[in-house]
Image: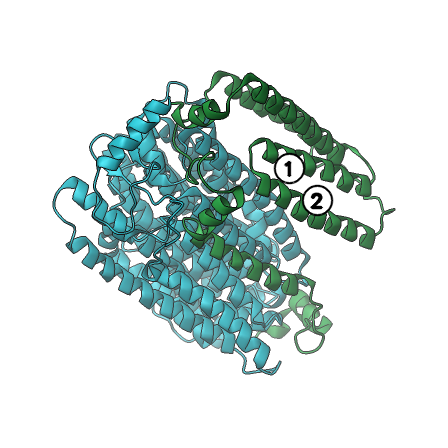
């Protein structure tokens, strides 16, 4: 046996490596033609090169969070309102700029890949697997870093007015948001299970606290506790999976796992399968895929509304980034085993999410189930296990960020102080009171329903196309069926806003029969036009609206929120018309190809 | 397949060493299980916390069995020494005598289902451990155990070379912990921020707020 090991060492040592960071030591694994040489802790070498460029946006967020804390300690207690939000937007902007720079920098790296498989691989390993091989510097990571930066900017813009309305103004919310973003970025960039787990924890723990941030609402505390207990449980499951996969493959690094599994066929792969299943469970919890979704409605309902949007965008994206890294890179040789599992999860997620959403009377709960169903489409893309599918999934996640954060921002406006109104009735007659707001919400709803000329349509199209290309016709049909079911509850909200149908939410609280029907009939004609071409609300219309909506709340839209909503809506429509985004997503799918 | 594991085992491997390692493992496992069952079965929270110490000592023993001496020491110092003391402190602080009234269960069949699922997964893991090979043959990232260098030295090298970034990023967790503690424990400031009773009334009752 020692001889065998020595043989392996000997063969590896023969391989000359051109790069400076890789050392030919016994911890290399050989596979087929190409060899991956890892930096192992050679007892004589304590040097590690840290390529800061590969984690630039992460550094911006972390340093920004610490700077915010420091600034808040120096400033007087009642300082300029909105200052922290402004700084957070600036930090997010810097991170976004950094990730754009990274994108072009990777373009430079890619332009100089030498010819020859082995040379190209060595070159890529040296330049794109950085900081002790813990982080990938590829466009996949960068796309997610941009996504998180955007979500942070939008989140800070929409959070400010919510926090001020609720009297929760403070620096902590923004620090937590930045830290959650840090964790999400690290998850997306992770090159191994250890980094992935750390990112997961950094993100999750911030999100637990954000869920419980509204201290005077008992629901918020409940949401935080629920999320924390279940999340800690899922983290433990994930860790167990890490341990089993490490036991089966001998490494926690995705590339080394893939290399080992590619070079050796396991005669008994029970441990590997068990570990893989546990990893899927742990990450499936974070993305709220169906058998592991039970926390979602309660947590979204209880969390402060803008934070719920941030969770839906960032946690989902990071969870899927982790799933893609683990399944598409680390366990890419095990496709035959994980694809059926993901297939089943996708089907359940699509159907349960959209069917349950119909039954909801609470806007945030409805959106929670809707976000579950949306996760199902990303699973469809993941299940295809092709570059088309991955590109579709990335596109979906990126565009969904704008849609869901915009939707939650609007809900945080119309729910009023103390989150008094979250029921469906709150949107009744919105087109009369706030035509522009209603129109923007309509855009988001249509996008989520997958109506053409929005990003939602393209996103669904790409993932379903990927499913068809990989021969998954049943899955494609189920996905389209689910879109049809989901259209019902999105359009119901739209109808309520435009007040054409009094009976749509009969039984929803706050709608008294007679007023609802007559008011609905009165508001009926031509109001869709009114929404698309915003007109100032007339006195008569206002009176009707007041009759319909007893607890009319202060629906003033502050400038930052308006800007954020404008960005979200503009992106949703513009990127839905002609989309360079899918090209970005396609560029980002060039994961390491080991062949 | 077995190269990595067997190579290290073969160099030190006599039957006697194996037997003693096996015995230490059994003792450690017994301690871990005793402690774990004690934590969930005992009624007095202080006893539960003390049972946790037994579990943690058992884990330390297993670490020693795996030649991870440093981890064993850290396990005892940090977990048994600091964290359980913290638990005890909190329990004492909240009052030892207070007994949580266990509310009615959400669903009647929750407990049996949980028991069945737990038993099934335990059996699955046990079967896997019997049927499967647990060694992969892939070399350890930290280098050979019987190679040059002390335990602590290897750990330090791992942390400051290959795992530098994860190690540094754990600092983010500490920042979050501090901020979270501030957020969750700070008393709400009265005054302008408070949701006033009058406003509440306005929200619930009626059209007064409509402008």
Q: Which of the 4 quarters of the picture holds residue A7?
A: top left
Left or right: B201 in relation to A402: right
Q: Is residue A107 above or below residue B211?
A: above
Residue A406 visible in the shown view: yes
Chain with green colouring: B
Relative to the observer, which residue lies in front, B172 or A327? B172
> What residue sits right under mark 1 in the picture?
B60
For image coordinates 81% across by 55% down, the residue present is: B93
Q: Name the chain under label 2.
A: B
First along the sequence among labels 2 and 1: 1
From the top left corner, tell me how far across and down residue A10 is, in percent.
27, 31
For image coordinates 64% across by 26% down, the residue present is: B24
Left or right: B193 in relation to A39: right
From the top left corner, tell me how far across and down residue A123 is, in percent.
21, 49
> What residue sits right under mark 2 in the picture?
B80
| Chain A: colour as depicted | cyan
């Amino acid at each position: 046996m020692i001889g065998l090991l020595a043989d392996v060492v000997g063969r590896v040592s023969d391989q000359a490596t051109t790069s400076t960071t890789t050392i030919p030591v016994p911890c290399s694994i050989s596979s087929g033609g190409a060899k991956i040489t890892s930096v192992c802790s050679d007892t004589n070498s304590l040097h590690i090169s840290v390529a800061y460029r590969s984690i630039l946006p992460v550094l911006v967020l972390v340093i920004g969070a610490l700077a915010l804390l420091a600034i808040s300690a120096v400033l007087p207690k009642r300082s300029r309102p909105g200052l922290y939000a402004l700084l957070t937007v600036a930090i997010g902007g810097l991170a976004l700029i950094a990730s754009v720079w990274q994108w072009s920098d990777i373009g430079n790296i890619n332009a100089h890949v030498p010819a020859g498989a082995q040379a190209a691989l060595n070159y890529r390993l040296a330049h794109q697997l950085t900081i002790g091989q813990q982080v990938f510097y590829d466009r996949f990571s960068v796309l997610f870093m941009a996504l998180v930066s955007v979500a942070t900017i939008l989140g800070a813009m929409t959070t400010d007015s919510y926090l001020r309305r609720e009297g929760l103004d403070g620096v902590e919310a923004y620090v937590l948001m930045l830290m959650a973003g840090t964790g999400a970025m690290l998850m997306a960039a992770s090159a191994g299970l250890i980094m992935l787990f750390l990112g997961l924890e950094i993100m999750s723990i911030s999100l637990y606290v954000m869920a419980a941030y509204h201290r005077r609402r008992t629901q918020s505390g409940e949401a935080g506790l629920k999320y924390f207990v279940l999340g800690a449980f899922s983290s433990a499951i994930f860790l167990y999976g890490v341990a089993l996969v490490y036991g089966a493959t001998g490494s926690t690094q995705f590339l080394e796992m893939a290399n080992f599994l590619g070079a050796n066929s396991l005669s008994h792969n029970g441990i590997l399968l068990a570990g893989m299943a546990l990893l899927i469970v742990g990450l499936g919890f974070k993305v709220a895929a169906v058998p592991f979704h039970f926390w979602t409605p309660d947590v979204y309902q209880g969390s402060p509304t803008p934070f719920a949007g941030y969770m839906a965008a960032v946690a989902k994206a990071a969870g899927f980034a982790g799933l893609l890294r683990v399944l598409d890179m680390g366990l890419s040789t095990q496709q035959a085993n994980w694809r059926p599992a993901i297939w089943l999860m996708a089907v359940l997620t699509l159907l349960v999410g959209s069917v349950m959403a119909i039954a909801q009377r609470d806007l945030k709960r409805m959106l929670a189930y809707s976000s579950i169903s949306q996760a199902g489409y990303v699973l469809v893309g993941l299940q295809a296990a092709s570059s088309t599918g991955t590109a579709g999934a990335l596109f979906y996640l990126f565009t969904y960020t704008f849609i869901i954060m915009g939707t939650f921002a609007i809900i945080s406006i119309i729910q009023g102080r103390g989150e008094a109104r979250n029921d469906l009735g709150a949107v009744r007659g919105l087109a009369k009171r706030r035509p522009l707001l209603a129109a923007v919400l309509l855009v988001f709803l249509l996008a989520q329903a997958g109506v053409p000329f929005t990003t939602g349509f393209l996103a669904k199209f790409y993932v379903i196309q990927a499913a068809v290309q990989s021969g998954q016709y049943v899955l494609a049909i189920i996905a389209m069926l689910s879109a049809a079911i989901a259209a019902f509850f999105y359009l119901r909200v739209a109808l309520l806003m435009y007040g054409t149908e009094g009976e749509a939410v009969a039984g929803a609280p706050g709608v008294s029969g007679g007023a609802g029907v007559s008011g609905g009939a009165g508001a009926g004609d031509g109001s869709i036009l009114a929404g698309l071409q915003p007109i100032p609300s007339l006195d008569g219309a206002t009176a009707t609206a007041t009759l319909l909506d007893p607890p009319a709340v202060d629906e003033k839209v502050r400038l930052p929120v308006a800007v954020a909503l404008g960005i979200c809506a503009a992106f949703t429509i513009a990127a839905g018309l002609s989309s360079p985004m899918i090209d970005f997503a396609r560029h980002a799918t060039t994961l390491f190809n080991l062949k | 397949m077995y190269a990595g594991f067997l190579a290290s085992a073969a160099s030190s491997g006599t039957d006697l060493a194996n037997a003693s390692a096996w015995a230490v493992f059994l003792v450690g496992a017994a301690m871990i299980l005793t402690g774990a069952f004690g934590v969930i079965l005992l009624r007095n929270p202080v006893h539960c916390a003390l049972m946790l110490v037994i579990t943690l000592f058992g884990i330390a023993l297993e670490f020693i069995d795996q030649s991870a001496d440093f981890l064993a020491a850290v396990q005892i110092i940090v977990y048994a020494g600091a964290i359980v003391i913290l638990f005890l402190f909190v329990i004492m602080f909240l009052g030892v005598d207070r007994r949580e009234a266990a509310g009615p269960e959400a669903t009647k069949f929750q407990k049996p289902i949980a028991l069945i699922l737990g038993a099934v997964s335990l059996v699955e893991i046990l079967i896997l451990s019997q049927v499967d090979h647990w060694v992969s043959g892939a070399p350890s990232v930290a280098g050979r155990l019987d190679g040059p260098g002390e335990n602590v030295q290897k750990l330090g090298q791992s942390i400051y070379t290959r795992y530098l970034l994860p190690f540094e990023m754990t600092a983010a967790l500490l920042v979050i912990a501090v901020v979270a503690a501030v957020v969750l424990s700070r008393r709400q400031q009265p005054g302008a921020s408070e949701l006033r009773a009058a406003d509440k009334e306005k929200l619930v009752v009626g059209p007064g707020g409509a402008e």
